[in-house]
């Protein structure tokens, strides 16, 4: 062995890391406190768990590798004093390797570990969704509710395709559908985006495939044009729109009224003879649906045109006004099967505190939002068993509303729309209405919450575990979420611990380097090396965990007494002082 050159740190660190990773994977496979949630995750679950533990224990592996460098290396005696240039040249490579390893640890801790935590949590939620959907499908097949069973089995298929656990259920469903000659259920509800137009009477959904009038004159011209082409329904629609846009008593309002009456007379003339019973009934239903749209009863209009679409699918008026009614319906309600079919990040419980403001942004109190489950997507979320309670500034309960289902979607820059009314896509008798505590007054089917949808997603994600949040999410959470009932110190402490931990690793690494040099053997060590390989990680584990506990206590105390910025400055100064003393201690060693 070369007596003048130490064994490089990198090979020992790589060997230690590989051995540690193998041990951690074995631990996850055979003695993990959290068993694999689904067989499909038999590989990814233990591997991700092992990588999370490996990143947490990486400083211990680094300390052990630094110590073993000097156990296996013999240095010739040199009579050199403290702070000698020769000693600095000897320590240059180990010091550079130590700084590099600490930087790698910082990257792993700050960037990759939160991703791994989040990935592991998503595997857990997917397993939960799979098991829930499988249980529901089993119950529905037993009571021969084939449609709902198909929906839940489709959810299982999205998570685990062709799984053995659902094979029997799929076979039963296939046989039942073949017997009934049922059509395949479309599991992907698609609805084209529809525009809306602002009028003095509120938002009006625009007709699909038609020119969108911007002014009253354009609406009148479109009414005349459609009347000339015998499109009486469209003519009446645009005339009615012009009338809503026009000022009462104005010439435009008079002209719009005249065109609307003329179009209506044309509609009345289209009444078929009684002998054509089907055409007559379709005519009556179309007229009823159109009138429902005119008075703003979009849900009733949707059911009418949805039924007509199955009977006369090629009728252009039916297609057009069904989409119009659907657009209006989505402003006040949503389809219940959306909440059931949606697969996303699912919380088993959600709790939010949301301020209540008036139009002048004055504080009127606070709203408490509770949900048994929340399924979260980037553009829409669904809740089940939702309760919203409104308290005044004195803390007295003013009113509350409960709903079996709720839909959350972006509404404005700092608002989120919560729809509380769910309806069935085909059966108008299946309605899930919100239940208000008040018995008088208008009972809305929706609420506009004073929280942006972006913050709603952040608050939902924050309820899983602060370790699942990235550095940016932690920073945003401690800044924004206190408004919604969260304690900022939780996110601040996690943020502070993550930022400071790589500095702690560097300080302890340099101290380990100095102590390893000071306690290096002067002759070739014997068999004592082998127990040291096992004991060193245990000793360093106790040192590291003790340092982390002390650091957490100090950080918590600082956060309780100072603001976040001042606490970070104090912590950075503290780490720089410790780093200075560690380097000073290393430089002061004799060779």
Image: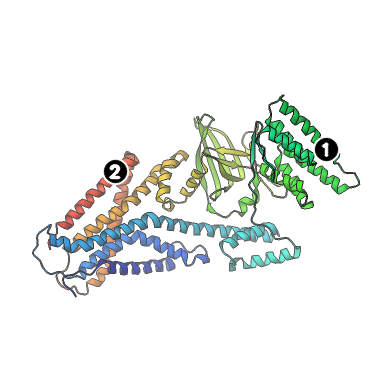
Quarter holding the N terminus? Answer: bottom left
Q: Is residue 15 left or right of residue 221?
A: left
Q: Is residue 200 left or right of residue 75?
A: right
Q: Is residue 549 left or right of residue 176?
A: left
Mark 1 against mark 2, which lies toward the viewer?
A: 1
* Colour scheme of the picture: rainbow
- Residue 539 visible somewhere in the drawing: no
Q: Is residue 354 left or right of residue 300?
A: left
Disc 2 crowd rating (10 Å Cα; few below 14, some 14-19, many 20+) is few
Quarter holding the C terminus? Answer: bottom left
Disc 1: which residue: 266
- Residue 424 visible somewhere in the drawing: yes
Quarter-of-image position of residue 302: top right
Please tell me which residue lies in front, 407 or 93: 93
Disc 2: which residue: 569
Q: Position of residue 135 (x, y in %)?
A: 61, 59
Q: Position of residue 420 (x, y in %)?
A: 62, 42
Quarter-of-image position of residue 184: bottom right
Q: Secondary structure at mark 2?
A: helix
């Amino acid at each position: 062995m070369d007596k003048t050159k130490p064994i490089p740190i990198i090979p020992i660190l790589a060997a230690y890391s590989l051995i540690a990773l193998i041990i951690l994977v074995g631990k996850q496979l055979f003695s993990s406190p959290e068993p694999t949630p689904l067989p499909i995750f038999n590989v990814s679950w233990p591997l991700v768990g092992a990588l999370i533990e490996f990143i947490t224990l990486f400083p211990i592996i680094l300390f052990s590798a630094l110590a073993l460098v000097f156990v296996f290396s013999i240095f010739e005696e040199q009579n050199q004093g403290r702070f000698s240039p020769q000693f600095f040249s000897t320590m240059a490579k180990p010091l550079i390797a130590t700084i590099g390893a600490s930087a790698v640890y910082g990257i792993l801790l700050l960037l990759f570990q939160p991703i791994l935590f989040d990935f592991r949590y998503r595997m857990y939620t997917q397993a939960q969704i799979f098991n829930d959907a499988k249980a529901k499908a089993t119950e529905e097949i037993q009571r021969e509710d084939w449609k709902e069973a198909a929906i839940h089995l489709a959810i299982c298929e999205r998570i685990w395709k062709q799984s053995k656990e659902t094979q029997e259920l799929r076979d039963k469903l296939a046989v039942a559908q073949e017997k009934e000659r049922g059509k395949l259920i479309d599991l992907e509800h698609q609805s084209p985006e529809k525009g809306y137009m602002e009028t003095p009477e509120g938002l009006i959904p625009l007709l699909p495939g038609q020119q969108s009038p911007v002014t009253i004159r354009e609406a009148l011209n479109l009414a005349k044009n459609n009347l000339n082409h015998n499109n009486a329904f469209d003519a009446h629609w645009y005339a009615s729109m012009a009338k809503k846009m026009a000022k009462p008593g104005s010439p435009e309002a008079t002209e719009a009224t005249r065109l609307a009456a003329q179009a209506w007379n044309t509609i009345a003339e289209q009444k078929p003879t009684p002998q054509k019973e089907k055409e007559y009934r379709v005519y009556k239903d179309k007229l009823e649906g159109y009138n429902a749209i005119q008075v703003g009863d979009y849900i009733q209009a949707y059911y009418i045109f949805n039924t007509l679409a199955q009977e006369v699918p090629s009728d252009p008026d039916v297609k057009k006004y069904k989409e119009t009614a659907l657009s209006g319906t989505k402003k006040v309600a949503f389809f219940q099967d959306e909440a059931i079919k949606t697969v996303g990040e699912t919380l088993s419980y959600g709790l939010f505190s949301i301020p209540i403001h008036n139009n002048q942004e004055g504080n009127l109190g606070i709203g408490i939002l509770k949900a048994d489950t929340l399924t979260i997507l980037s553009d829409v979320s669904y809740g089940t068993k939702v309760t919203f309670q409104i308290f005044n500034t004195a803390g007295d309960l003013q009113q509350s509303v409960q709903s079996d289902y709720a839909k959350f979607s972006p509404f404005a820059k700092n608002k989120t729309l919560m729809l509380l009314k769910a309806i069935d896509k085909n059966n108008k008798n299946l309605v899930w209405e919100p239940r208000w505590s008040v018995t008088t007054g208008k009972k809305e089917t929706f609420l506009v919450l004073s929280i942006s949808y972006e913050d709603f997603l952040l608050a939902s994600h924050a309820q899983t575990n602060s370790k699942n949040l990235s550095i940016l999410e932690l920073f945003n959470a401690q800044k924004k979420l206190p408004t919604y009932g969260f304690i900022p110190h939780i996110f601040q402490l996690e943020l502070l611990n993550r930022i400071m931990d790589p500095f702690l690793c560097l300080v302890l690494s340099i101290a380990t380097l100095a102590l390893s040099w000071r306690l290096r053997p002067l002759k070739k060590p014997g068999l004592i090396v082998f127990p040291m390989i096992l004991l060193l990680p245990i000793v360093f584990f106790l040192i590291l965990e003790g340092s982390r506990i002390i650091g957490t206590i100090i950080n918590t105390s600082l956060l309780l007494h100072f603001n976040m910025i001042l606490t970070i400055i104090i912590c950075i100064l503290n780490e720089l002082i410790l780093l200075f003393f560690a380097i000073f201690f290393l430089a002061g060693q004799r060779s």
